[in-house]
Amino acid sequence: MDENTRPVKLLVSIVNRGKGEKVEELLQSMEITYHLICLGHGTADSDILDYLGLGETDKDIVLSVIENDKIPLALDTLDNKLHFSKDGNGIAFTIPINSVGGPITLKVLTGLLRREH
């Protein structure tokens, strides 16, 4: 591994529709620079949602590439600012990324290429 690159993971944040931009803004402030916001829609019927105490099925799914050393700060920030530890406010988790299409791609995903220029 190049000395300028670090291991990365995919941070998946799921929030109510319209909150994805706030997640992106918070992560961007920590120099986590690559994000994709997708629209999610749950399929549970209203009886199940009522039983679980959930209201909305429309969600924003924010996919972010994050360096391993930034994960604790990112998760703490999402919890402190968006109250992820309270029911119904959102959830975030990481998935390992084992390989990408070359060192330049990794630099683009982690924002390192932008920082070098």
Image (spheres, rainbow, N blue to C red):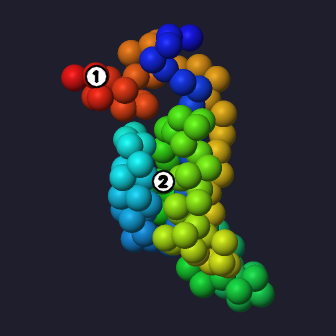
Q: Work out whether residue 90 can be spotted.
A: no
Report whether 32 appears left or right of 93.
Answer: left
Report whether 46 appears left or right of 38.
Answer: right
Q: Are marks 2 and 1 in contact (CB under 8 Å)?
A: no
- Furthest residue in direction left, as rendered: 117
Residue sitting at x 28%, y 22%: 116
- Secondary structure of the residue carrying tag 1 is helix
| Up/down of 41 relative to 117, above or below | below
| Quadrant in which the C terminus is drawn | top left
- How far apart in space, not on screen, are marks 2 and 1 (Cα)? 26 Å
**Tag 1: Cα neighbours inside 10 Å, few (<14), some, or many (≥20)?**
few
- Secondary structure of the residue carrying tag 2 is strand
Where's residue 51, x and y in %?
77, 87
Label 1: which residue? Answer: 116
Where's residue 102, x and y in %?
47, 12
Q: Which mark is residue 45?
A: none
Label 2: which residue? Answer: 62
| Quadrant in which the N terminus is drawn | top right
Where's residue 101, x and y in %?
48, 16
